[in-house]
Image: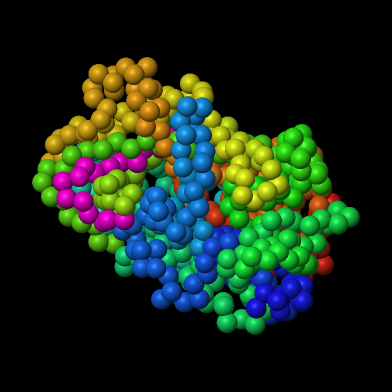
């Protein structure tokens, strides 16, 4: 198949069949006059039955397993003294195939920040029709906020499980509001989690978008294909150097779209000589385009786990590992609902080993501070694909970072101490009262247990061409080059106040629409910066 493709020069090459890449390729190939080639480093099942069952089971989180073959692990530092391993999906559907199935929209405040960089098209009111277009909301159907004809089926978690009912009652006891629909921009509070999991099956965009399109003669999807470099000639991206079956080839294309994820897209740009000039020269990579913003910073959210002991056996989850979710605002009130307390109905010992139930094990809340932050950075050390980047999250550097996470842990402790939650719990495991009441000791406890919410955005951020903090325009076109776009969460200047899975689908839809518009107007791939 690949030999035939090499001779044909496809109109568009999409690098990465992840969440956004599957969306983009499916939408672009709706135009029978446009040939689309998708290159994916991982395996590409051609039918739902070819997916390993564990990748579809919504009670499991394959990305949390140390030995999952559908995952690539990145060695990172969350703080200078906190090394960590961060997973990313390497299979059709990308991280959407191995994540939790969380499908919550960004908040209106997120779109306000993004539109400040990307213009009015990135406002919530302009994006709402696209959000409705991509979904079939099985709980609300078609209304001014929700859609009923899109590829992604959305179902909210069941609140009848005893532990979830206790969570709801505890939030009410603390005077926190209900938020029955977390995709409706209501005031933050307690509610079910919107998911792309239906009847116990997590449906990634490879299934919901791309499998339906595989029969189109103008769409080709190739798995097991690594992209080493983007080739640039006279200011235009003209092709890619690929490796497939142990052989390297040059593949020419009319336009190239990077959908390799927030780490992968920036890393490929760096290896191709596109990024901060000084960093590239230090890595002995010839500078093709000095683009200071590529990998200079990224946005993500710190997270810790607070565990509690159930009274007796707890019912095994049926449809999803998620229970309820609570969003509350930190004390400065700057970002409404910036603290997230997400309930797991599967013990951590089960999430990390692929078991939906572990009798006698404690259950957990995943506690995150989700205010926008852009402290992370990527540094490429070599043009060789096998040499990993230096990835530094730089969590807990500021007093606000530490304060927000302390507040989130303390709210979780208040919930566990409530009369309502004591009906199902015999208490939290950690932190103890002496630690909880002391800022310095609680900071130490958090630092020793720190994780990340896996919400990486902003490695190739959008913004005006004259802004050194921006690398692409609002449609993902790289400033300073023609024929090259980025279409994944890399382009979001900051991570949203909610997990970015739904926004990654939105990015794929939006940039596909922009590319269709550009083709119709005769401006395909042009962006001189």
Percent x, y of residue 313: 13, 50
**Residue at image coords 40%, 63%:** 55
Vertical side of 445 occupied by 249: above or below: below
Judging from the image, the colouring scheme is rainbow
Nearest the eye: 12 or 332: 12
Percent x, y of residue 509: 60, 62
Nearest the eye: 493 or 295: 295
Percent x, y of residue 336: 45, 36
Vertical side of 279 occupied by 179: above or below: below
**Residue at image coords 57%, 82%:** 215
Q: Is residue 494 magenta?
A: no
Residue stretch in magenta: 354-369
Q: Is residue 362 magenta?
A: yes
Percent x, y of residue 277: 78, 37
Nearest the eye: 443 or 1: 1
Res. 428 visible in picture: yes
In the image, farthest residue toward the front: 246
């Amino acid at each position: 198949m690949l030999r035939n493709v090499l001779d044909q020069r496809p109109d568009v090459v999409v690098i990465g069949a992840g969440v956004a890449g599957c969306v983009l390729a499916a939408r672009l190939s709706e135009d029978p006059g446009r040939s689309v080639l998708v290159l994916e480093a991982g395996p590409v099942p051609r039918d739902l039955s070819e997916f390993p069952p564990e990748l579809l089971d919504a009670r499991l989180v394959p990305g949390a397993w140390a030995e999952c073959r559908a995952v690539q692990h990145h060695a990172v530092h969350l703080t200078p003294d906190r090394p960590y391993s961060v997973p990313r999906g390497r299979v059709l559907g990308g991280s959407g195939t191995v994540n939790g199935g969380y499908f919550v929209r960004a908040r209106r405040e997120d779109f306000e920040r993004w539109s400040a960089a990307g213009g009015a098209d990135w406002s919530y009111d302009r994006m709402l029709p696209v959000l409705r277009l991509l979904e079939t909301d099985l709980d609300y159907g078609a209304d001014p906020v929700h859609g009923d004809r899109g590829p992604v089926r959305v179902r909210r978690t069941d609140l009848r499980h005893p532990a979830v009912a206790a969570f709801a009652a505890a939030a009410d006891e603390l005077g926190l509001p209900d938020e029955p629909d977390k995709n409706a921009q209501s005031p933050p509070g307690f509610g079910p989690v919107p998911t792309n999991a239906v009847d116990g099956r997590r449906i990634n965009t490879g299934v919901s978008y791309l499998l339906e399109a595989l029969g189109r003669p103008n769409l080709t999807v190739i798995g097991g294909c690594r992209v080493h470099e983007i080739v640039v000639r006279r200011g235009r991206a003209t092709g890619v150097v690929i490796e497939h079956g142990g052989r390297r080839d040059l593949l020419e294309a009319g336009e190239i779209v990077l959908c390799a994820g927030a780490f992968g897209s920036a890393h490929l740009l760096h290896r191709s000589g596109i990024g901060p000039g000084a960093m590239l020269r230090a890595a002995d990579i010839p500078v093709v385009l000095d683009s200071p913003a590529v990998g200079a910073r990224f946005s993500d959210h710190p997270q810790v786990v607070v565990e509690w002991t159930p009274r007796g056996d707890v019912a095994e989850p049926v449809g999803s590992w998620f229970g309820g979710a609570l969003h509350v605002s930190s004390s400065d009130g700057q970002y409404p609902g910036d603290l997230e307390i997400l309930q797991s109905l599967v013990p951590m010992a089960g999430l990390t080993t692929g078991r939906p139930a572990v009798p006698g094990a404690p259950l957990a809340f995943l506690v995150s501070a989700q205010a926008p932050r852009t402290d992370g950075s990527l540094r490429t050390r070599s043009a060789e694909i096998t040499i990993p980047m230096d990835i530094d999250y730089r969590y807990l550097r500021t007093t606000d970072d530490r304060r927000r996470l302390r507040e989130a842990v303390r709210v979780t402790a208040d919930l566990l101490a409530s009369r309502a939650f004591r009906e199902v719990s015999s208490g939290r495991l950690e932190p103890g009262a002496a630690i909880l009441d002391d800022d310095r000791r609680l900071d130490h406890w958090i630092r020793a247990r720190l994780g990340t919410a896996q919400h990486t955005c902003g490695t190739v951020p959008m913004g005006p061409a004259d802004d050194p903090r921006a690398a692409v325009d609002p449609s993902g076109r790289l400033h300073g080059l023609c024929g090259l776009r980025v279409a994944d969460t890399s382009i979001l200047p900051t991570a949203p106040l909610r997990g970015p899975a739904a926004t990654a689908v939105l990015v794929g839809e939006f940039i596909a629409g922009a590319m269709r518009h550009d083709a119709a107007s005769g401006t395909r791939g042009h962006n001189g910066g």
